[in-house]
Image: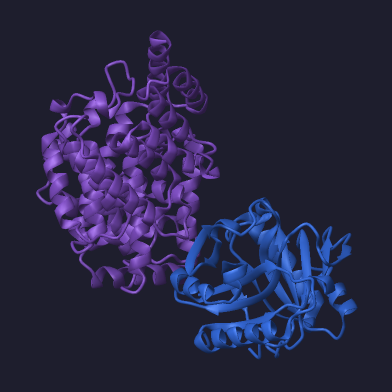
Amino acid sequence: MHYFALLLGPESTSAPDPDAQAAEMAAYEAFHAKAATAIRAGDALTPSSTGVRITGGADAPTVTDGPFAESAEVAGGYYVFDAENLDEALALARDIPAAKYGAVEIWPIVEYFPPSKPLGKSWLALLLEPPANAHAPGTPEWDAGITQHQKFGAAAGDRTNGGAALHPPATATTVRVRDDQVLLTDGPYVEGAEVANGFYFIDVGDRDEAVKVASMIPATTVELRQLMGISGL
Amino acid sequence: MSNLDGVFRREWGPAVAALARWSGDFTVAEDAVQEAFAEALRAWPRHGVPDNAGGWIVTVARNRALDRLRRESVRPGKELAAVLDDIRARTDRVDVHPVRDDELRMMFTCAHPALDPTSQLALTLRLISGLTVAEIARALLQSEVAVGQRITRAKNKIRHANIPLRVPPAELLPERTPHVLACIYSVFTEGYWSTAGPSAIRDELCDEGVRLAGELCSLMPDERDAQALTGLVLLHDSRRQTRVDADGTLVPLEEQDRSRWDRGRITRGLERLQLAAGARGPYLPQAVIAAIHATAPSWQQTDWATICVAYDRLIEITDSPVARANRALAIGFRDGFQAGLAALDEVADDPRLARSNTAASIRADLLRRAGRRDEALRWYRVALDHNWSGPAREFLRRRIAECAADR
């Protein structure tokens, strides 16, 4: 089955040190080589200062430019894994360099729609919901959501390029590695806050167009972040 | 009827484990075994308990589960057929009778570290020990609704996040076995240390903690930490009858009637300790401390030097401030109460102790023994302010009265 790994960590505000940056790239390349057979997609995200958040729903969207001050831990990257079970997904997560200084949330995916075109520097639209709004598959609320997403899919056409729906937050697991010890916690990294509930890849020419498409997504909040296009995955 | 209770208690865990393996779903397993027990309650008083009660339960439960899947499935016929084929394929592959490996699988899945520790405990008590949600709620001092939701959420996570029902592969065992041990130990400690809640439930949890630890030893005979854990719970449990008096007040070890300690459990605990030599976890040093107390002829003739060494080892493994505070007391008996107080000063400000009364009550005890009654009185009052459990409060009040009278 598929799992979504959301990489969270403190975002550096100073200019990056080239040596540290090279070391980090090497660590990620080593991870990609090791986990090649399980990784279906993945990339780093451009800094949150270049992203936007859209709230208020498709009818009355409010757009806020990043960075988003309320959280110290910022999404810095993502992966989609194809793993046999949660143990395998957790074994992959602990090898992600971000687990050592930040945290990796592992979310079981309800259904994964793989991108049909290369992602390059596409946009990741991360759907965020308060935990009470994150419904389980099979509930009437879930079914109602599916209908809305089908409408969105029809309206967005080929401007979306794959995506996924996630199971509710009680099924998530947070992975951190400190002093070589793996620390697991039941649930998302930040309790009570809005949590990941799904995502779309948006394949458009510029940021304004991406905001336009993301504003139509039926979700409490959409965080729109451009992919760095550096993973080569 | 009590005869049937015994059968149910013995067969519940293995039957749920067998059904979980067979159906691949914990809720299906739990519900089906529940129905099979209800059926047994009707059939057995009339026809007698079958020779293979466990096999009977599993067979009935499996049929009930199939009935229910057929009845409740709203999926198109084709999908239902696929579900039944899948289940049949599993049934053909495996024996329907409970096998011991099923229980071990259940222990590892219920104590999976991706589940919150309290959920691990609740799930273990429900699916392996067969306690009802109401009983678990009483044991954990939580509402039935909260415990019910917790168990449902944990089962949903197992299903949707696909936590495998299995004994982990060898390379994962060193990091996963400690979670199973910790979960079993918390079954015991919820009964033994938590002095709140009704005593019948506490006795049941103690018994169950001892039983599960013993089960784990027979399922993983080479696991030395499991032997150490079993030794530890047996040695603690040998004092169960003497640690609370007729009024429900906590009786300190020093004042317990040693002739009433359970010799059988002490002997079995010491045997486990032999098998635990070389264990690396936190249970062996704790079991050593319990063994020294269990075998000392009196409080005065207790081998405090060895107890101090065991605490040193425990602190090396766990870095626990509670262990450091208790070590200070042992040092007080080995080297004098002044030395004990000095050792306590080194840990008393640890922020991890801020919400506990451990340091205050140990300080009060050392001061009282050193003859510094006024200071002892003050610290007993601090400890009392921090303590919410009935029997322990009674004990602290008694000490306060003693110190006040001696002034």
The percent coordinates of residue B295 (x first, y second) are 15, 38
**Is residue B59 or residue A160 the one in the foreground?**
A160
Figure chain in blue: A
Eyeballing the image, is A215 above or below B128? below
Figure chain in purple: B
Residue visible at 57% across and 70% down? A100
Which quarter of the rendering shows the C terminus of chain B?
Answer: top left
Which quarter of the rendering shows the N terminus of chain B?
Answer: top left
The percent coordinates of residue A143 (x first, y second) are 65, 61
* Residue B132 appears anywhere in the view: no
Eyeballing the image, is B297 above or below A74? above
Eyeballing the image, is B96 above or below B129? below
* Residue A30 appears anywhere in the view: yes
User: In the displayed structure, does residue B59 sit left or right of residue B72?
Assistant: left
Q: Which quadrant would residue B267 be assigned to in this image?
A: top left
Residue ranking furthest to the top: B405
**Is residue B69 or residue B124 the one in the foreground?**
B124
